[in-house]
Each structure stands twice: as structure tokens, then as C-alpha cells.
Image (cartoon, grey):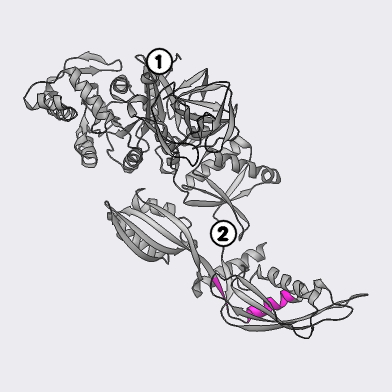
Amino acid sequence: MKEYRTKEIRNAVLVGHGSTGKTALSEAALYVAGAINRLGKIDDGTTTSDNDPDEAKRGFSINLSLLPCEWKGHKINLIDTPGYADFVGEVKAGVAAADLAILVVCAASGVQVGTESALGFIAERDLPTIVFVNRMDRENADFGGTLSQLRSVLGKKCVPAQVPIGAQDRFEGVVDLVTMKAYTGEKGSENEIPSSLSETVSRYREQLVEAVAETDDALINKYLEGEELSEEEVRRGLRAGVISRTIMPVFSGSATKTIAVGLLLDALVNYAPSPQDIGEVAAQQGPSGPQERLSVSQGGPLAAIAFKTAADPYVGKLTYLRIFTGTLQSDSQVMNGNKDSNERIGQLFLVRGKSQEQVSQLVAGDIGAVPKLSATATGDTLCQREKPLVLTPPAFPEPCYSAAVHPKSKADLDKMGSALSRITEEDPTLRVHREQDTAETILSGLGDSHLEVAAEKMRRKFGVDLELTPPRVPYKETITTSGSAEYTHKKQTGGHGQYARVAIKLEPLPRGSGFEFVDRIVGGVVPKTYIPAVEKGVLESMQEGVIAHYPLIDLRATLFDGKDHPVDSSEIAFKLAGAAALKKGAQDAQPVLLEPIVNMSITVPESNTGDIMSDLNSKRAKVMGMTPQDGSSVIEAQAPLAEVLRYATDLRSITQGRGSYRLRFSHYEEVPAHVAQRIAEQARKEKEGS
């Protein structure tokens, strides 16, 4: 691929609901542009974009894909992203690297949940947007109905730029409302506008011209005076409207039949902003310095953001970069502005699906990849040592769904830590932590499919076979009344025996106080050298409570009496006596089971509020408050963790994917008696089974 200047580059991210044909559209664009010579099929797993075995197996996109192509003297970097909700981290990364979004909508299904989500991501970045109504050849395809839905969501700025000729099995092309010509068939042959469409074309053309005129004072005056706008004026005004985000033009076609795909590429060249058109880039002078604004220039200071990291089976770690300003050269030294560390740039690549083409440099506005960076992670900025800069990283969603990870063999155990570290480096929406109370390794992500795919990737890429199970709830136990216990440990064997007697008093402490050990021994009835051993025995015994073998918390143990033997006493004897006394005393102090309570902040459409409230009540939750917010309701609640371990799935089912939530640990609370009995019975069975 030849080298292009910044003004000749277009960066467009394909976003939308799952199964609207984003991958098919990107494949068709590559084919029409001549970047590939055969049109791959999603069902066959042969598309350039979905090259991951998991994508071929599941039939939908999981990772974002870079798909550069050349069209009419311009380089177009298409970024294909998943539509499935579990993989929105990839969408966020793609949006962060793009200058324009192509919102892909199915002509048969119209505006769907994923369409609304994609519009939210676009709004966060304030990206210029064009709409492509795909699948005009499908049964029930309805351009007019889809356009009405789009305008009800987006308002008047959503205007048609094309009118489809026919629909469903009679779809054959489109009328371009800028050139006022018809283009039919796969090759886009130019024709006269069908007379049957003249009224529709006239109406939609008027909507487009009115929107275009409002972008410029001279154009609006000409329009109000009843003069006809020229094709060049409409084209110029449409480009200005797209770049200023005041116009969201709607195109249409069929990706699988490659009808009107070339016209979409024309639209990217004619109406999409180049990286220079987006304006200055906000950057920080180092990790904690003041803000400054940088003009987009190939000769300016280097500022490139790592928007994705991939574990490539051939070259190792591969970091995807968007160059915002400056020029990145191969075989050079740069600095990681976030970590103040040097990075050596070896070979630079242009990536198209799984293929890689070596290049000598990446200029401002371009997108490429570099292998084997040592310290750079997703979200970091590469810059020059003499001009340290930090760009705003992509904002990724917090994980909300967790599973315990178990190795299937000893070999898997040895490699598990490294594999988890590498998969979380590759995917910033994954988190790993060790739950001390349950001795489990917990992998957290955005949903069950997200974690299943992560486990499959670790098996395929790193040779680690892992099993995912629901995480154990870290219950605790405590006492509710004071009690005393005395225990004598006596064991006689040949030679020295073992002897220790201790008497302790147990008292409950306020929730969250932890553990206190008090020495009330007088007269030396227990020698001072043995008192730490008693405390150690009590502490160890607290790790396994008396109801369901969960740790005991929030109590005070006071050692007030005891007895030793001049020959048979030892530290181990007093440790064992202290442990047994604790168990005995706890059983007599009305022990109870405690469960973790979490704070929940749930954002749902107003229409789902009642269903969410009802579902929360069934989960023993307490609703603390509700706040209306732009057509949504934000519900604040507290619920037992055990009841909401799988809440991501429940919420998605109730709201059809429109809801979101956050969890934060709050406190421990006593488990209701009937629930505690069930938990204790389950714990007893598990202990007997082991």
C-alpha cells in the first residue's frame, strides 16, 4: 500500500446492533475496493474481519478488526466491531481510534437495543456519524419505516442521502440525492431515476437540501430565496454538516450483494472528516502536567495512543496504535508518557484482519500496529522523550459478571497465572483477583459469553485448560451473646505428655470491628511464654466457624484462667487448648451466619422500572431510592451478594439489554434463619463429600 498524507486518510468505525451486517459490509467494502479478490462469508468463517476461530465457531464478531483499503486516492481505515453486548470493550476501543462512525442498521429490524447502545458510545466521543441501512434485499426490509424510527431517536439531523430502488427481492440499487442519479446492480451502473420514485425522491431531496442549507449562511439565504442549490454546494454543505455533527446522512444498500457499497466508500471520501478536520487534540504534558491542545500535523510532536493489545500467535504481543499527531518511524526510540519509560519501536505493520504488511512509518491520523512493546498497555500514550504527552485513554466499562477459575490439571495450574495476566492485558474489560476468604481465583468480565470466550482464548493461545464455576460466596460467622468456655488438652504418651488448660470469655463486637485478644491472666497461672500460643490457636480456630465452617469475625476473646504442667506443658499444647476452647465457647454464644451485602446502582429504561423493582424484591433486596434521568430510572438498592451473582443475565433478560448496573461491597449482615439453615446443610454435604 502506498503512503498517504494525513488529509487523504479516513478512519471509520462500524457500530450497531449484532447481526445487522457490519462484518459483511466491511468484507464487501474490501472486495469492492480491490483489497481482496474473493468475497468471504460469515457462515463459512471466511471473512477477513472474523478471522478468530471463536468468531468462526460462534458466527459473530468478538474482536475489533482493522481493515484498511484504498479508494479514489484515499486510504480508508475501516474498523469492524462486535455488536454483542458482552464485547462492548472492543467497540469502545474502536470508537476511540476513529474520526467517524458508520451506524449500521438492518432494514428489516430497524432501530434495536444495540443501535441505541452504539449511539451512546458515539455520543460519548461526539463522533461525526453516517447511517447505513443494510440488508435492503431482506424480507420485510422497509427503508421508510427504518428512517422514521431513526428520526424519532435522532431528530431532524437524521436525513436521507439516498433512496433505495425497490426492496426485498426486488431491491436493485439506490438514487443518490446529491447527484440526483440512480445507481443499480453490483457495479453501480448509472441510470435515470425511476418515475415511480419521483415523488419520494423529491420529498427526501427537499429534506436533505434544507438540512444542508442550514450549515452555511450563504446557502440558507439562497435556499430561502427559492434558488436551487448546485450539486457542489449540496456536497460541500453535507460534508460541513457531517463534520459539525449537525447532519447524520442515511445511506442504504445490501452488503451481501455489494449493492451501493461503492457509493458508501464515495461518501467516506466526500463527506467524512480527515484527521485534520476533527480539529486540535487535547493532551496533558506528562502524567500530571497542564493540558495543551495540539494541531494534527505529520511534523508535530508525536502523540499516539495504544487502543488495543492482542496476543498474536506469531509475533507475540501486538499493540494497535492510532497516531493523533506527529510521525512514528520504524526502528526508533519513543517514550511511554504514562509510565515514563522508553520503548523501542521495531517493525511497524498495517494490519488487515490477520494479515500484516510492513511499513516504514505511520503518519498523523493513521492506524497501525507494533509488536513486542515491553511496558505499553491499552490506553497508554507513546510520545517523544523531549516532549512528554498523555492523551485521554478510552473509557472501558467495569466488569459486572464473575466466575471462579479452576485449572483442570497440575500443568494447567503452573501456567494459569501467566495466561490470566496475558488475557487481562489483551482485554481491559477483564479483571482477575484472588478471593482470600474462599481461596478462589476470580475472573470478572461483562457476561457469561465474555468469560467463556476468554477461557477458550487461553486454551487456544496459551495452552491452559480452565474450568469456570460460579464463585463461592464469602460468608462469615459471628457470635451474638457473651459466653465462657474452658478446655483441658491432655495427652499421655511414652515419655513427656501434653497438658494445657485454658479458660476464655467470648464477647460479640460491633460489625466490622474485627478480632481482639485480651490477656487477663493474674498470678501467672498461665506462663507468659504460652499466652501467644493460646492467641495463635484461637486465631487459627476462627478460620473455620461452628455453623457452616466459614470464618468467625467481630469478637473479643479474653484469656482469664488456665493451668500448666511443669513437665508436660508446651506451646503446641496451649495452642490446641486455645483452639478447642474457642470452638466450644462459640457454640454456646448463639452463633449466626453473616452474608456480604452489596450496593447496587441500576440504570434502566423507565418502562422497565416496575419489573426491576419486582425482581429485586424476589432477591431479598432493599430499594434505597430511585432517580429519574433522561427517560431512564437509576435505582439504588442493597442486596445479598448470593442473590445477584448472575444479575447481569437477569437484567439483560428483563430490559432486552438496555439496562446496566454497578456493584460495590457494603457490609456484612445476618442471614435469615431459613436461608442460613440451607447454607449450613450445603456446607455439611460439601465437607462430607470432600
The disc placed on residue 472 is: 2
Quarter of the image that includes the C terminus: bottom right
Question: Residue at coordinates 24% horizontally, 26% vertically from top-left?
Answer: 240
Q: Position of residue 155 (x, y in %)?
A: 20, 39
Amino acid tagged 1: Gly
Q: Is residue 136 above or below residue 122?
A: above
Residue 232 in sight: yes
Amino acid tagged 2: Arg
> 534 or 524: which is nearer to us?
524
Which image quadrant is residue 647 in? bottom left
Which image quadrant is residue 197 in? top left
Q: Position of residue 209 (x, y in %)?
A: 15, 26
Say whether residue 315 is left or right of residue 235. Answer: right
Question: Residue at coordinates 37% horizontally, 26% vertically from top-left?
Answer: 275
Q: CA distance from mark 2 to mark 1?
A: 54 Å
Q: Is residue 255 above or below residue 380?
A: above
Q: Residue furthest left?
A: 225
Residue 588 lies within the magenta run: yes
Say whether residue 26 is left or right of residue 523. Answer: left
Q: Position of residue 205 (x, y in %)?
A: 15, 26
Q: Which residue is mark 1?
A: 34
Label 2: few (<14), some or many (≥20) within 10 Å?
A: some
Residues drawn in magenta: 578-593
Residue 179 in sight: no
What SS does tag 2 mark? loop
Q: Is the stretch drawn in magenta largely helix, strand or loop?
A: helix
Q: Is residue 658 above or below residue 590?
A: above
Q: Residue furthest right?
A: 495
Residue 359 lies within the magenta run: no
